């Protein structure tokens, strides 16, 4: 006999049920919470590297690439929003995860490829966020050190203790069972992302207004002056990967859509949330990237709040970096919940009789509602957070890691699968005008992904050669 407990719908005071038509807890999300989830997922550590990315490409190509990625991301997210329910986008059966959407629309082999791409990307993002949060925590100590001992002091501080602190916080938050219960965390994280982006923006603007005469150009860093010809090419490839990472949220779009209440139709609400989220982030990205480049020119640091492009006012730099760390606490959860959900669902289907995997135990915690504790969930989620923290300690390189994650995930998850599902769902004729331009878009994005991945791998190899484990990483 199965130990799983199936709840029966209760009628609430207003006559509605506390469960949706699929038997799951009633969803309460709106375009506001969905926009907050998207902004939390998108405006992450990627914004901090945009001044560096634009410095590699210059005033013409830099903003052009930013706008191109924002358009592609929005366009494909609208295609993906229509795939949440299938076969009909309004009344069809719900699909709860990105990989389930691919399975319902494209079937077998592509479902397996999608799952592999999605979960590799999600693991990569959680490792990347552990690296970035620890760098921001270290930057607070370094900022105070520079203020106290002068800008010439090396102020080398080990990242590892801060990675451990971040992992301990994530172990606690990871015990929250469901994604839709994290709306409050996403809203806090979105506020934090606006705070540190605005501080970076303000400091860059102040530096420009203050008469900073940074070297900038239409084509970015100059060959023979700043870099060699080969370095220029590699850096441009890596910069494209950084920008691709800055827009990565397709892999959690379906999970975000699954938090929306049923009326109005989820696909319509999600398209609105995607438009608001991507427009907001693009505005911030262009301002942060362009003003950061104007302030620092071709010498823009890889991360302009932790790479010490700014030293003063030190308290404001400290506050911005604390905001980054708090934001990444929430963003980590947005990206890790689909991994948790996948493994736990698979385990329940594999061992339906296991009390260890399926048993829920009520625990009373002061100031909280009754919390259900599941021993398997607690053990698996804690183990996962520890593994990502250890991997972050082994590869603590900010820009290269972001570029690699962005380039590996951008084509399959943001472009290929949404386009293929749209073609299949609409029974589009092969070699029709729309079919041809969609395929061209997909192939162009594949080539961009490959060259940016190569650039990031070259950057990682270069960093590993000169890596000293007990120095602060920037």
Image (spheres, rainbow, N blue to C red):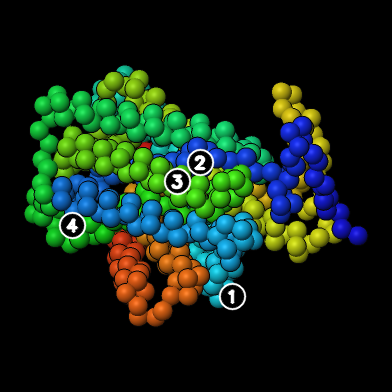
Query: Alpha-carbon neighbours of circle 4 within 10 Å: few (<14), some, or many (≥20)?
Result: some
Whichever of callouts 3 and 1 sits on the residue coming sooner in the sequence is: 1
Q: Is residue 68 above or below residue 286?
A: below
* Residue under the image location 39 percent in, 24 percent down: 319
Question: Quadrant location of residue 440?
Answer: bottom left
Whichever of callouts 2 and 4 sits on the residue coming sooner in the sequence is: 2
Q: Is residue 81 above or below residue 10?
A: below
The answer to whether residue 325 is seen in the rendering is no
Q: Is residue 312 above or below residue 2?
A: above
Q: Where residue 232 is drawn, which disc sits there?
A: 4
Query: Alpha-carbon neighbours of circle 3 within 10 Å: few (<14), some, or many (≥20)?
Result: some
* Residue under the image location 42 percent in, 67 percent down: 419
Whichever of callouts 2 and 1 sits on the residue coming sooner in the sequence is: 2
* Residue under the image location 39 percent in, 32 percent down: 194
Mark 1 element type: helix
Mark 3 element type: helix
Of discs 2 and 4, which sits in the foreground?
2
The residue nearer to you, when weighing 357 against 309, is: 357
């Amino acid at each position: 006999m199965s130990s799983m407990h199936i709840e029966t719908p209760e009628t609430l005071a207003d006559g509605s049920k506390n469960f949706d038509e699929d038997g799951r807890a009633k969803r309460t999300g709106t375009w506001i919470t969905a926009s907050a989830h998207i902004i939390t997922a998108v405006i992450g550590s990627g914004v901090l590297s945009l001044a560096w990315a634009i410095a590699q490409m210059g005033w013409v190509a830099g903003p052009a690439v930013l706008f191109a990625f924002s358009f592609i991301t929005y366009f494909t997210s609208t295609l993906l929003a229509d795939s949440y329910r299938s076969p009909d986008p309004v009344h069809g059966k719900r699909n709860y995860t990105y990989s389930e959407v691919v399975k319902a629309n494209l079937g077998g082999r592509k479902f397996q490829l999608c799952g592999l791409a999605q979960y590799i990307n999600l693991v990569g993002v959680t490792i990347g966020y552990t690296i970035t949060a620890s760098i921001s925590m270290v930057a607070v100590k370094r900022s105070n050190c520079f203020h106290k001992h002068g800008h010439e002091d090396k102020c080398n501080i080990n990242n590892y203790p801060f990675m451990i602190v971040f992992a301990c916080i994530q172990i606690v938050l990871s015990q929250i069972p469901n994604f839709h219960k994290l709306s409050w965390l996403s809203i806090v994280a979105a506020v934090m992302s606006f705070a540190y982006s605005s501080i970076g923006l303000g400091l860059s603007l102040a530096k420009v207004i203050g008469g900073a005469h940074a070297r900038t150009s239409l084509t970015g860093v100059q060959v023979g002056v700043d870099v060699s010809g080969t370095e220029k090419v590699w850096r441009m490839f890596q910069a494209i990967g950084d920008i691709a990472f800055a827009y990565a949220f397709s892999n959690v779009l379906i999970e975000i859509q699954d938090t929306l209440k049923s009326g109005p139709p989820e696909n319509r609400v999600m398209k609105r949330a995607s438009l608001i989220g991507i427009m907001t982030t693009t505005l911030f990205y262009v301002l942060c990237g362009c003003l950061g480049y104007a302030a620092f020119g071709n010498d823009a640091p890889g991360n302009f709040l932790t790479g010490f492009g700014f030293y003063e006012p030190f308290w404001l730099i400290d506050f911005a970096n604390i905001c980054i760390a708090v934001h990444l606490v929430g963003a980590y959860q947005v990206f890790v919940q689909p991994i948790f959900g996948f493994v736990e669902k698979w385990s329940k289907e594999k061992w339906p009789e296991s009390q260890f995997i399926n048993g829920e135990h009520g625990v009373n915690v002061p100031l909280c509602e009754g919390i259900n504790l599941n021993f398997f969930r607690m053990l698996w989620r804690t183990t996962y957070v520890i593994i990502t923290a250890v991997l972050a300690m082994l590869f603590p390189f900010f820009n290269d890691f972001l570029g690699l994650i962005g380039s590996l995930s951008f084509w399959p998850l943001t472009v290929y699968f949404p386009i293929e599902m749209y073609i299949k769902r609409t029974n589009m004729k092969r070699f029709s005008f729309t079919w041809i331009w969609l395929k061209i878009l997909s192939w162009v994005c594949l080539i961009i992904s490959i060259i940016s991945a190569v650039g990031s791998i070259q950057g990682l190899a270069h960093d590993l050669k000169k890596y000293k484990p007990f120095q602060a990483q920037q």
